[in-house]
Amino acid sequence: MSGASVELASLTFSYGETRMEFDLKVPVSSVIAIMGPSGSGKSTLLNLIAGFETPQSGAVLIDGRDVSADRPAQRPISMVFQENNLFSHLNVEDNVGLGRSPSLRLTQKDRQDIADALAHTGLAGKEHRLPAELSGGERQRVALSRALVRDRPVLLLDEPFASLGPALRREMLSLVRQLHFDHDMTILMVTHHTDDAQLLADKIAFVDDGRIAAFEDTTTMFSPSAPDAFRAYIGS
Amino acid sequence: MPRPVLAALTLAAALVALPAAAQEKLTIYTYESFTSEWGPGPAVKKNFEDVCACEVDFVAVADGVALLNRLRLEGARTSADIVLGLDTNLTHEAKETGLFAPHGISLEKVNIPGGWSDDVFVPFDYGYFAIIQDTEAFSTPYKSLKALVNGYPEQRLVIQDPRTSTPGLGLLLWVKAVYGDDAAEAWERLSSRILTVTPGWSEAYSLFTSGEASMVLSYTTSPAYHEIAEGSTRYKAMAFEEGHYLQVEVAAATIKGAENPLTAQFLEFMTGPGFQNAIPETNWMFPAGETSKPLNPAFDHAVKPGTKLSFSADEVAANRDAWVKEWLEIMSR
Amino acid sequence: MGQLSDRRVLAGLAGLTAVGLLIGGAFAGLISQAVTEWSGAVSALDPYLFRITRFTLWQALLSTLLSVAPAILIARALARHPDFPGRSIILRLFALPLALPAIVAALGILALLGRAGIFADLLGWLNGGQWQGIYGLSGILVAHVFFNLPLATRLLLHALETVPGDQWRLAAQLGMGPATSFRLIEWPVLRAALPGVAGLIFMLCITSFTIVLTLGGGPRATTLEVAIYQALRFDFDPARAVTLTIIQIALTVMVVTLLIRLGTDMVGDPNLPVSRRRPSIASRRETIFNFALILSALLFVAAPFVAIIVSGLQADLSRLASDPALHRATLTSLLLAIISAGLSILLSLSLTVARSALELKRRGQGHPSILERLLDTGAGFVLVVPPVVVGAGWFILLLHSGNVFVMAPIMVITVNAVMAMPFAIRAIRPAWDGASKRHEKLCASLGITGFNRLRLIDWPSIRRPALTAFAFAMALSLGDLGVIALFGSDAVKTLPYLLFERMGSYRTADAAGIALFLGIVCLALMMLADRTRRNA
C-alpha cells in the first residue's frame, strides 16, 4: 500500500446558516493535522472527503481522480472516529473482518491478514474478545487494524484519541507513526492537541470559520512566523 | 387552578344530587327503543302526565330480556313501579321471581289474537317476528325459514342477542318451533351468514338500514314504517311457509309499584287510546287495546302469517337457559 | 414517626389511600360476590368462557404481529432516510391515534371499510362479489393495527435512533448492503427493543374494550372485557362477571410481570429526539422500496382520520349543534373530564410531593422505606386492572348497597382519574423533583413552608408539566367508554356514550358528526399537552 494525493477544489458546503469553502492540496503519503476552534468545520471537512456530506459545488480529487460522485464505500478512504467504531455484539476479529467483507464472508487469506493486522497493532491473542472487554485504547487499536485490512491509501482520523489519557495517547500516536512508516498511506487527522501535531504531522491545516486559513509545515506553524489566528488558537 | 375547579366541583355535586325531586312520580323500566326520541315514550309520557298531574320517569335498558335481568338483580330494592316491555316468553319466569303484583284492572279494552287473561301482566302491543330484506341488495324473497337457512352465503343477516333481546329470544324459539331437535344444526348452518349479533333491536335495525346487512330480524310491521315515514317500499318482510312467531309485549306492576296509586292508573291508561294511539306509528307494532283512529292502510300490507307459532310461557321458562346456552355455544365457534 | 409530621407526607398518604380505596373496593366487590355465590362463579367455567379467553389471546396475538412486523420495516425505512420529506410531520401524525378515542376510530374505520363504506365497492370488486364489511375479527384487527402500528413504529424508531451516527457512517464506508447493515446494525437494537414493544401492544390488545364492543361484539368475536360488560349489563349475572374478571386479571398480571421483567416502560410513548445528521446509506432501489413503504403506512394511518372528517362534515351539523341531547352530553362530558383530570393531578401531585419529601429527608442515602416505594410505584399498579375491571368490581359492590346508576358520575371521574395517574406522574415528577431539590435548603433557611411554598416556589416550576398532565388526563377521560358503558343510563350520558347510542340507533350521520366533534376536542387537548411538554 502506498498513499494518494488528496485535493479539495473550491469545495463548498452549506447547512442551515453555516457556509464553508475549502481549497487544499495534500501531497502523497504525507501526514496532515487539521486544527482549529470548535465549530470551525474540521469534522465537516473530513465528512466531505469521506462522502458523508454532500458538497454544493467543487470537487474532491484523490490521486487526481474526482470522487465526488462516489458513495463512501467506493472511495479509497478509511476513517476512524472518536468512538463507536466497533459493533458491540461482534468480537474483535469480526469487527476487523468487516473491513475486508461487509457481509463477513472471509477467505483463509483474509483471516491471515486480519491476524497480521492485529499483531501489528498489539492485539494478538485478543481476537475473540468483545468490545466491552477491551480498554478504550484497545478499541481504537481494533479500529486501526480494520483500516489496515481495508488497505486504502487515505486514512482519516477524527479525534481518534481524544478520550484517552496522555500516556495512552502518546502510545497510540507512535503506533500511527509506525503504521505510516510501514504502509506509507496519506493521513489526515483532526486534533485539538499540539503534541499530536508536533509528534506526527508533516503539515498543519488550520481551519477557521469554514475555510482553510493556513496550510504550512509543522515547524513553520509552531514558529513565531505562524499566522496570528493560529497562535491565538494554540495560546502561544 | 382553583376557580374553575371549584365551579366544576359545585356543578358535579349538583349533578350527583339530581335524582331528588319532590313531585308525585311514576318510575317505568323499559327498553331503549321505547324511550328514544322516535319511540312511543315521549307521547306516552306527555299524555299520561296530562291526566295524572305527576311525573313519569323512564329508565331504559338495552332490550326486553335485560329488563327482567335487571329487575331480578335489584330485587325488592328496585325503584321501578312498572316494568314495560317483557313478552309472553318471559312472563312465567317473571312471575316466579315474586317481584310482580296483580294488576287488579279490567282487561275489557284488551284486544289481541287468541284473547288474553292474566292477573299480573297486561299486554300493550303485539306483532309477528319476520325477516326483513333490503330489496336493493337482493330481490327474490325466501319463501320459508328452511330456505333462508340454506340460502346464499353472501346475503348477510343481523340478529339480536337472545340474552338481552326479546326479538333475539323470539328467533331462537321460532327456529326451535320449526326445527325441533335439529335446531342446533340449523343455527350452525345459519351462523356463517350472521353479520353480527346486537344486544338490542335498535342496533340491529340501524345496521340494516345503513346498508351493512341485507337482512334483519324484526317484525312483519316494520315495512309499514318505511312506507309511511319515507314513502319507500325498499324494505320488505318475507312470508315464511312454516308460519311466524307471535310476540305479545306486556307490562306489569312491581310489588313496590303496587303501593303507588299511579301504577294501576297507568296500566288502565295503557289499554286506552292515550297510549295505544302512539303504538302503531312509533313502536311499529299492532295495538293491543283501544285506539281512537283506524290503523294506517300501510299496516294492511303487512305479511299475514298463516300459522301463528308460539311456545307456552311454561315451556319457555323450563328450557330457556339450556336453549340459550346451546345457541351461544354454536355462535361462539 | 417523625416523618409523618410533614404535611407533604400526609398528603401523599391520603392520595395513596384514595387510590387504594378505589382498587380495593373493586376487589372487595369481586371477592364478596365470589364468596357468597361461588357455585355460580364455578359454573361459569364453560366452553363459552374457554372460547372467549382463547379469542382474547388470539386477537391480541394477531394484532401484535400485524402491528409489529410492518413497524420493523417502517421504522427502519424512517431511520435510513433521516431526510425523508415531511418526516417530522409523519412522526407527529403517528402520535395522533393514541389521542383519538377508540370509538371515534372505530367509526372512521367503518366509514372506510364498512359494508356501506367508502371502499366497499372497490373491496367488493376485488372480492368478486358484494363486500361483507369488517365486523368481527377483521374489524378488530384493522382497528388495533391502526392504533398500534404507529406506536410500534415510533418505539422502534426510538430504538434505532440510539444507534450512534458514526456507526451509520461506518456502514456507509464499509459498503454494507441493506441485508448486512440490517443484520449488523439495526437488528441488534431492534431485537433488544422488540420484546418490550410487542409485550406492550399485546397488553393493550388483551385489555381493548371499545374496539371489540363496537367492531366485534357478537358471540364469535367477544373478548373477556366485553364479556364482563355483557355479563353485568345483559345477563345481570355477577357470578359470571367475577369469573371473567379473575381470568382477565390473571392474564394482565402475567403480561405485566413479563413486561417488568423485560424492563419495559409501560407508560409508553417516547419523545423522539431530533434526528442527528447522518448519511442516508440506502441504494436507489432500496430508497424506492422504503419510500413506498412509508407512504403506504402514511395512507393507512391517515385514512381513518380523513374518513372521520369527511363523514362528519356530511352530517347535518347545524341540526346537531342545536340538539339538546348533544348539549347535555357535551356538558356532562366536559364537566366529568375536568373534575377527573383535576383529581388526577391532585392525586399525582400528592404522591410525587410526598415521595420527594421522603427522599430528601434521607438525603438520597440508605434504602427507601416501604412507604416511599409505594409512593414511587403505587400508581403503576393500576395498569394491571383495566377500567372495565375496576368498574365491574364497583358495579357488583354497589348492587348490594343501592342504586348503581346514580353512581355513574363518581365512577367515571374516579376511575379515569386514577387511570391517568401513571401518565400524570411521569409528566410532573421530574420537574417537581428537580425544583424541590434546588429549593429545599433555601426554603428551609427562609422559613417558607406549606401552602406558601407550594404557591410561591413549587407551583410555578410545575405549572407547565401539570398543564400537560391535565390536558392528557382530560382527553383520556373524555374518550372513556369502558366505565360509562357499565354505569351509563338515561340519567348520565357522556359524549362517547351518546355516540355509541347513536351508532346503535338509526342515526349513523349523527354519530359521524359527534365523532368529528369528540375527535377534534381530544386531539386539541393532546396537542396542547404536547406543546406544553415541548416548551417545558
Image (cartoon, coloured by chain):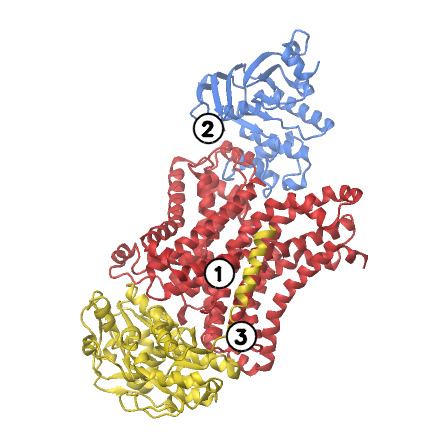
Question: Which residue is label 1 attached to?
Answer: C332
Question: Which residue is label 3 attached to?
Answer: C403
Q: Mark 1 lies on which chain?
A: C
Q: Where is residue A73 in the image (x, y as percent from the top left)?
A: 48, 30
Mark linked to residue C132: none
Q: Colour of chain C?
A: red
Chain letter tied to yellow: B
User: Would you say residue C521 is visible in this rendering?
Assistant: yes
Q: Chain A is drawn in which colour?
A: blue
**Do discs 3 and 1 belong to a common subunit?**
yes
**Do discs 1 and 2 belong to a common subunit?**
no
Looking at the picture, tell me which residue is in the foreground, C360 or B73. Answer: B73
SS under mark 3: loop
Q: In which quadrant is the C terminus of chain B drawn?
A: bottom left
Mark linked to residue A74: 2
Q: Position of residue A41 (x, y in %)?
A: 56, 22
Q: Which chain carries label 3?
A: C
